[in-house]
Image (tube, rainbow, N blue to C red):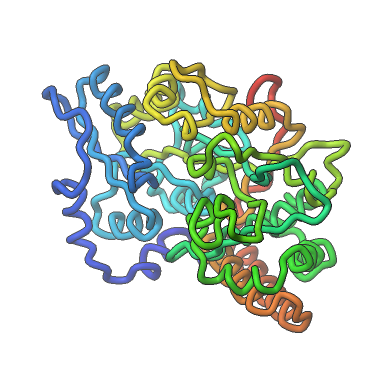
Amino acid sequence: MSGSGNVVRTVVGVVLRVVLAGCLLAVSAVVSGCGGGGRTLVVLGPWTGGEEKPFLKVLDAVGKRTGHRYVYQGTRSLRETLVAQLQAGAPPDVAVLNNLGDLVEYARDGAARPLPEGVAGSAVKPWAPRVQVTDGSGTTRENAYWVPVRIDLKSLVWSRSPPTTSPSWCLGMASEATSGWPGTDWIEDLLLQRRGAQVYQDWATGRLAWSGPEVRGAWQEWADLLPPESAADALSTSFEDIGGGRYGLLNRGTACAQEHQGSFIRRHYGNEVLPYPTALFVHGRAARQTAFEVSGDMAAVFKESDDAWRLVRELTSEEARRDWVAAARPQEQPLFPGGSIAGTRPPTPGTRTVQALLDGADRICFDASDAMPPTLRDAFSRAVLEFLAAPHDSANLTRLLKQLDKESEFQHEDGAFQLDDLCDRPHAGGAGG
């Protein structure tokens, strides 16, 4: 693969590109800050189904300060939507994306624009590492291309009670086009807790074989944690159903009592379910060092203008963060690089615990699959689903890991691995890099 130019030609093909481009300015998008006579800027983002409401209020407040209008388009299919818009020559002004692998491709292809002075200071690690891009003349430059606007903590287990020696796990893998990602989180976290940040980073950046004992051991340990019936049920159970429903942690008629999931899941739980570090449940090496995975939603400019850059600056400002916290429900108050933002309503115990764990981490490492080249990330998710169909079949695991080795080698030959440093030591009192 040779950057997102190939992705643009192959991922979506001829998927209604003109129609999707027109939809950007249609009434089907949500318009925020409709008053005033300034410019209209389009913002593509991941929040839908009610999750976008606090962000819309932030855009409304930003619009009052800037005099501009912001059209928000939310989608669960960020990659497909943005690729189609790029095909049609109608990208959003700003896109909020959650995959570093995708962002690297857009930077290499010239679709995402490098951050100017005055914005680059918000590109904090490990959410926004610098990327080397070679232009048409053969000149290579290193720049930052995106900034985190909100973040999440992973390496968490949600439970009604403190860790037990034999936890029973709730598990759901279904997530429409991205099914399998809760399983990739499990593999990543087990590797991080067992082997430490350096091994995790070497594997995530393509320098450590999938079929080697370190990575294979994480898959095998995951299989040993899960009862066979949990693995089979997980393939058809949505990760969103874990907060309730037939297989949910809150359904006291089920056998499962713990869920491995990132901090965003707290919106499903009340004060009776709290987060704990994964290491307390799997007895990793964190007795001496506390390491956590993190993820994030990053803003990048795709249609360059002073107004687009001002929006990015506004979205990372203290004022916008206060507006976001004030607009969100207590169990959905966002997390930010650099520490918490005080709001008018107190956060839930779950939110306070997540922030304390983030502040106290020794190492934070960006979600490995979200940093991988997109085709490898997708292959990883598919392998998780195949693995769960027969989690104790050693020959099947060998086959899957060899396939992932081949895909990883191909990505290295093509130069798709662009990120070398996915882990960082947080500054005292916050999560900034």
Count the marks.
0
Q: Which quadrant is the C terminus positioned in?
A: top right
Q: Nearer the viewer, residue 210 or 174?
A: 174
Q: Residue at x 48, y 59 (%)?
A: 3
Q: Of all residues shown, which one is farthest toward the front?
A: 253
Q: Residue 17 lies in what quarter of the image?
A: bottom left
x and y, in percent, of residue 162 in the image = 75, 41
Q: Of all residues shown, which one is farthest toward the bottom?
A: 395
Q: Of all residues shown, which one is farthest toward the left?
A: 37
Q: Residue at x 27, y 68 (%)?
A: 15
On the picture, is 207 further left or further right than 262?
A: right
Is residue 322 visible in the rendered image? The answer is yes
x and y, in percent, of residue 396 in the image = 71, 82
On the picture, is 276 further left or further right than 174?
A: right
Q: Residue 369 lies in what quarter of the image?
A: bottom right
Q: Nearer the viewer, residue 325 or 415?
A: 325
x and y, in percent, of residue 14 in the image = 27, 71
Task: Give above or below for 421 relative to 186.
Answer: above
Is residue 422 visible in the rendered image? The answer is no
On the picture, is 333 further left or further right than 356?
A: left
Q: Nearer the viewer, residue 330 or 382?
A: 330
Task: Give above or below for 122 relative to 4.
Answer: above
x and y, in percent, of residue 196 in the image = 81, 47
